[in-house]
Amino acid sequence: MSHSQLKVRNWEQFQHYKDRNPPWIKLHFALLASEDWVTLDDASKLLAVVCMLVASRNNGFVPNNPAYLKRVAYLDRLPKLKPLIECGFLEIPQADASTMQAPASAAQADARPETETDTEQKDSLSETSSDNPPKPKKKTAYPDAFEAFWKAYPRTPNMSKLEAFQAWQKLDDNDRALAQAAIAPFKAFLRTKPDLEIQHACRFISKRRFEGFVTDNRELTDEQWQKRLAYSRREAKWSAKDWGPVPGQPGCIVPSHLLQQGDGHGWREPELAA
């Protein structure tokens, strides 16, 4: 039974081997910065590496045959190729007989070992090619409420915005407001623990760590909120680290039925007030 074939996207761009099938492949570090890669499940990440190994023996092509891949890679179950196709890692080539390759099991490999000279020559080639430009990635559109959360959260350079957004999407509107409100007291807590590692925003959300910083405010009675609002209206001050975002800002947890028009406008942090 014959099977169609799939192609590893941009194979010619990243694998500079022309005269033989290599005994190993190049696995670029940039893969870890790809949103397509980091959002795949672990099984699909492993399958992507398996496909590159198989493609190295078949000029960039992979048989669309899960049973074959399961056998050749010693997998425990039939792999699912659909996620790799949907994220663009694998492409369905045009039905052109001149470009379709023989199944991977029939590919003949040149087992010559890679020499240091070979490696230096191939590594000197540009990692980009004007003939095979990478496909533009579809940019994720984030809602304003999440953008406000992301801007306020204490981030690190390797923190994934997409992972945080995926966790954010699982919250209801009330929990999103609480997560936003928790940022100011969380930052205040971090200032008392300068050696504490900042946790990833996705875990702050998915593990509901934000609850520990807003529980007291969430349990306030209307009368207690009214006292705070009366003080703030009189003094034009609002303690965001203690009470959450100022009225009118994303994440405000003051009961909406207690707010008046203009609440929050011009209110400052007490320590910043003149």
Image (spheres, helix red, strand yellow):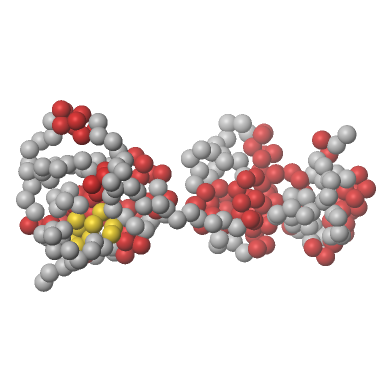
Q: Position of residue 235 (x, y in %)?
A: 91, 44
Give whichever of 184, 122 is nearer the camera: 122
From this view, report whether residue 68 is shown above or below residue 27. Answer: below
Image x and y of residue 246, in percent: 78, 50
The quadrant holding residue 256 is bottom right
Whole-percent x and y of residue 93? 24, 61
Question: Does residue 235 appear in this view?
Answer: yes
Residue 181 at what x, y percent from top left? 70, 51
Which image quarter holds the N terminus? bottom left
Classify the position of the C terminus by image quarter: top right
The residue under the point 23% across, 47% down is: 12
Is 80 situated left or right of 172 in this image? left
Residue occupying the far right of the picture: 234
Q: In this view, does 158 lie to the left or right of 254?
A: left
Q: Is residue 76 left or right of residue 257?
A: left
Compared with residue 265, is residue 75 higher up or lower down, i.e. above or below?
below
In this view, the residue farthest toward the bottom is: 1
Q: Is residue 185 above or below residue 83?
A: above
Q: Which of 92 and 169 lies nearest the eye of the viewer?
A: 92
Residue at horizontal 56%, vertical 56%?
Answer: 142
Residue at 70% in and 55% down: 251
